[in-house]
Amino acid sequence: MQQRAHNSDQSRAAAGFTLAELLVVLVLIGLAASVVLPFAARSYGNFKLRLAENSLRTLFREARSRARFEGRVEAVIFMPPDRTGRTLILVRDDGHRIDGVTLPAEITITAERGDGTWSETPDPIHFFPNGTCEATQFDLSNSRAKHLQLELTPLAGSTREVQPEKGSE
């Protein structure tokens, strides 16, 4: 039998990584995380804002469709915010609850009143059997002060995104 001479390089490779090598890798991972994590957190906040916008649009679309289909007035009621978020409820004119959606707690919603002021306690929005609704404008904002404004058009009962006014930012 022949025995092989163990080379010091072979025994070192079998032993694993050195502490210095592990520290370099950990530092590189830390640097990469410090660059990526703030971007991911900001993107997640914007995602929640867009999700709230889509939930609001969907609820308004459902209210309009139900009002036209059932031939009765439907209303979207804004419940006061609590620690879980703000709940919006779709109800018929007889008070029967149809549907609802809860916006995340970090999303703030304000509505423009008829006199041009903004309120955090929006009045109910009514949708009528002829497809029209009460017009208003909504401002959605997240904890990073990113704003998104929606306008509810009275004749079509549809929503469209509008540019935030300088005074509401």
Image: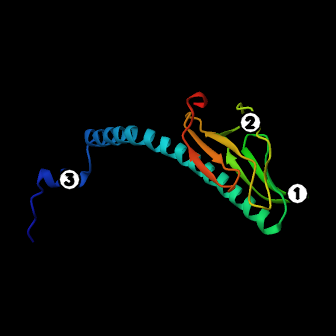
Percent across and percent down for residue 43 are 48, 45
Assign a secondary structure to mark 2.
loop
Of mark 1 and mark 2, the one earlier in the sequence is: 1
In 3D space, how far apart are the residues under numbered discs 3 and 1 (Cα atoms)?
77 Å
Of mark 2 and mark 3, the one earlier in the sequence is: 3
Q: Provide the residue designation for mark 3.
A: 13
Q: Residues within 10 Å of mark 2 (few under 14, many from 20)?
A: some
Q: Provide the residue designation for mark 2.
A: 113
Q: Residues within 10 Å of mark 3 (few under 14, many from 20)?
A: few
Q: Front-most of 87 and 19? A: 87
Q: Residue furthest top?
A: 167
In 3D space, how far apart are the residues under numbered discs 1 and 2 (Cα atoms)?
22 Å
Q: Residue furthest bottom?
A: 1
Percent across and percent down for residue 20 are 26, 38
The residue positioned 63% from the left and 52% from the top of the image is 159
Q: Tell me which amino acid carries mark 3.
A: Ala
